[in-house]
C-alpha cells in the first residue's frame, strides 16, 4: 500500500527521442520530481539522456539495458511512456505483468499522445492500467498550454457566465513533417497526420468547450465527418527527399500516409445543446515553424491564439549564415528573415504545466485531469474520422463497429 503524499515522485522514462527531451526540459519547472531512470532501444541515446538529466539537476538517472530492469528498479515510482506508437502497448503489457507479479513498485503511468493506434489497443491500455491498480494520466500537452489555461479561465468566468456557453471551437496544427522515420509509416504510427496531430486538435477543442469542473464526458459525441488527402509528400521530388532522409523504409510512392486532415465533430452538452469542433492538421505547411491556431466562439465573445504570433521576433539578413537548427521555434524552416521566437517552448506548448499536474496528482494519489479514459475517447474520434474519410460519409456515434477498425493507411502498410 503506497502512502500519500510522496515527498518526491521518482520517474522512469521509456523512450529517449525528441518528445522525451521536450518532457525532460519541462521538468525543470516541476517541483518534487526526480528523473531516476531511462530505457530506450539505443544505448547511445540512453547514455546521452542520462547525462542531460544530470546536467539539468533533475537527479541521478540510471540507464537501463532492458525495460524489465527499469520497471523492477526500487527507485522508480512512475513510468512516462514516450516511445514510438507501435511499442506502447507492449510497454504497458510489460508494466502490467511486472506489477501484478509483485516485481515492480511502480504505482502510476503516464502515456504520450495518442494513447494507441486503434480503439482495441487504447481499450487494452486502459484495462491493463486499471487491472494493475495504476494511477494513469494521458499526456495531451495542448490542454495545459499557458494560453489555453488562461484563455479558458477568462472566457468561462467573464463571458460564458453572463451570455451563455461557447458553442464552436476551432483548432489547427501544422508543420513541415515529423522528425523520425516511424512517424511516416502507417503501420507503426497508426496513420498519418490525422493520427499524429488531430489527437491534439480534437482534445484541446473538446477541453475548451467543456465547462470548468465538469467531466470531459459531459459533452457527448454525436457524429464525426473527416477528410484526408496527400497534398505534398507524394510529389516525386518530395518522395525522393523522404527516401534520402529516412531510407527505403519510408517509400511514399508505394506506402504514403496522409499529410492533410480535416475534421468536423458534433457534440451535445448536458442540456442537449449542439456544440461543434472544426479542426485541420497538416504536414504540408512551410512557414517559420510549427503553427498552432485555436479559436473559441460563443454568443457574445471570441478567443483566439496563434503560436507564431509571438511578442519576440528576430530579423537576420542574408549575410547571417550558420547551420540549420530549431533554436528559435520547433520545426523551424529558415534561419534568415523575420523569425518569431518562442522564449519558452516547453511552457507555451503546455509540457511544463502538464508534467507539474501529473507529478502532483501521482505524488498525492489523485486522479489527473486527463486519464487513459480521455486517451481512449480521443482514439474513438480519430477512428471515426478515418472511417468517415474512407467511405465518404458522416459517422454517427456511438459506433461499436469501430472497435476493430484499422485505418486504410495502416492496413496497406501492414499488408
Image (cartoon, rainbow, N blue to C red):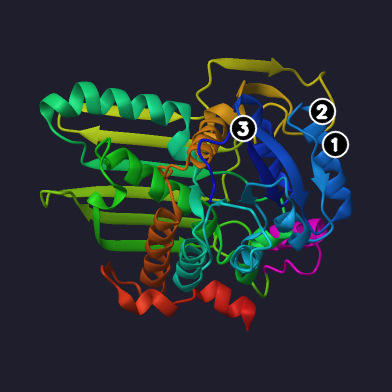
| Residue carrying label 1 | 51
Q: Secondary structure at mark 3?
A: loop
Residue drawn at x 50%, y 24% is 309
Residue 260 image point, x, y percent: 50, 56
Residue 378 vs residue 89: left or right? left
Q: Between residues 182 and 126, which one lies in front from this camera angle?
A: 126
- Provide residue 68's location: percent of width, then percent of height: 75, 62
Find numbered disc 1 in the image and state the secondary structure of the residue it sits on: helix
Instruction: Nearest to the eye among marks 3 and 1: give it.
Output: 1
Q: Is residue 233 magenta?
A: no
Per the image, the residue denoted by label 2 is: 55
Q: Position of residue 8 (x, y in %)?
A: 62, 33
Disc 1 crowd, CA 10 A, few/some/many (<14, 14-19, 20+):
some
Q: Nearer the viewer, mark 2 or mark 3?
A: 2
Question: Which residue appears at 49% of the width and 50% of the height?
Answer: 138
The residue sitting at the bottom extreme is: 415
Q: Nearer the viewer, residue 235 or 107?
A: 107
Q: Which mark is residue 288?
A: 3
Dividing the picture into quadrants, the one containing residue 33 is top right
Read off the magenta span: 236-252
**Residue drawn 27% across and 37% down?**
213
Cβ atoms under marks 1 and 2 closer than 8 Å: yes
Compared with residue 66, is residue 338 higher up or lower down, i.e. above or below?
A: above
Seen in the picture, residue 171 relative to 192 is either above or below; the reply is above
CA distance for labels 2 and 3: 30 Å
Q: Residue at x 51, y 67 (%)?
A: 128
Amino acid at each position: 500500500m503506497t502512502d500519500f503524499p510522496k515527498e518526491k515522485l521518482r520517474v522512469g522514462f521509456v523512450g529517449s527521442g525528441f518528445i522525451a527531451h521536450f518532457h525532460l526540459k519541462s521538468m525543470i519547472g516541476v517541483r518534487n520530481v526526480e528523473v531516476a531512470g531511462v530505457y530506450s532501444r539505443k544505448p547511445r541515446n540512453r547514455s546521452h539522456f542520462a547525462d542531460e538529466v544530470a546536467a539539468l539537476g533533475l537527479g541521478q538517472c540510471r540507464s537501463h539495458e532492458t525495460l524489465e530492469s527499469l520497471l523492477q528498479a526500487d527507485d522508480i515510482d512512475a513510468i512516462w511512456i514516450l516511445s514510438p506508437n507501435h511499442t506502447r502497448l507492449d510497454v504497458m503489457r510489460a508494466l502490467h505483468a511486472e506489477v501484478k507479479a509483485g516485481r515492480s513498485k511502480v504505482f502510476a503511468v503516464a502515456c504520450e499522445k495518442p494513447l494507441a493506434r486503434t480503439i482495441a489497443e487504447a481499450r487494452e491500455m486502459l484495462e491493463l492500467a486499471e487491472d494493475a491498480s495504476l494511477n494513469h494520466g494521458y499526456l495531451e500537452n495542448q490542454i495545459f498550454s499557458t494560453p489555453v489555461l488562461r484563455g479558458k479561465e477568462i472566457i468561462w468566468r467573464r463571458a460564458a457566465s453572463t451570455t451563455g456557453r461557447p458553442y464552436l471551437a476551432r483548432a489547427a496544427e501544422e508543420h513541415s513533417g515529423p522528425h523520425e522515420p516511424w512517424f511516416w509509416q502507417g503501420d507503426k504510427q497508426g496513420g498519418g497526420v490525422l493520427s499524429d496531430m488531430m489527437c491534439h486538435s480534437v482534445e484541446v477543442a473538446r477541453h475548451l468547450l467543456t465547462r470548468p469542473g465538469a467531466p470531459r464526458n459531459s459533452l457527448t459525441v454525436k457524429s464525426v465527418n473527416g477528410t484526408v488527402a496527400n497534398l505534398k509528400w507524394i510529389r516525386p521530388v518530395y518522395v525522393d527527399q523522404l527516401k534520402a532522409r529516412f531510407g527505403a523504409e519510408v517509400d511514399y510512392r508505394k506506402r504514403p500516409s496522409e499529410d492533410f486532415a480535416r475534421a468536423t465533430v458534433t457534440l451535445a452538452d448536458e442540456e442537449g445543446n449542439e456544440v461543434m469542433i472544426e479542426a485541420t492538421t497538416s504536414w504540408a505547411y512551410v512557414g517559420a515553424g510549427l503553427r498552432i491556431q485555436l479559436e473559441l466562439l460563443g454568443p457574445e465573445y471570441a478567443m483566439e491564439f496563434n503560436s507564431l504570433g509571438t511578442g519576440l521576433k528576430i530579423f537576420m539578413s542574408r549575410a547571417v549564415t550558420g547551420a540549420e537548427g530549431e533554436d528559435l521555434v520547433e520545426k523551424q524552416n529558415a534561419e534568415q528573415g523575420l523569425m518569431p521566437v518562442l522564449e519558452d517552448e516547453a511552457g507555451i506548448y503546455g509540457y511544463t504545466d502538464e508534467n507539474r499536474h501529473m507529478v502532483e496528482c501521482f505524488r498525492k494519489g489523485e486522479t489527473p485531469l486527463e486519464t487513459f479514459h480521455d486517451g481512449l475517447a480521443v482514439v474513438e474520434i480519430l477512428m471515426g474520422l478515418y472511417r468517415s474519410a474512407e467511405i465518404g460519409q458522416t459517422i454517427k456515434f456511438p459506433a461499436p463497429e469501430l472497435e476493430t477498425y484499422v485505418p486504410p493507411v495502416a492496413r496497406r502498410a501492414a499488408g
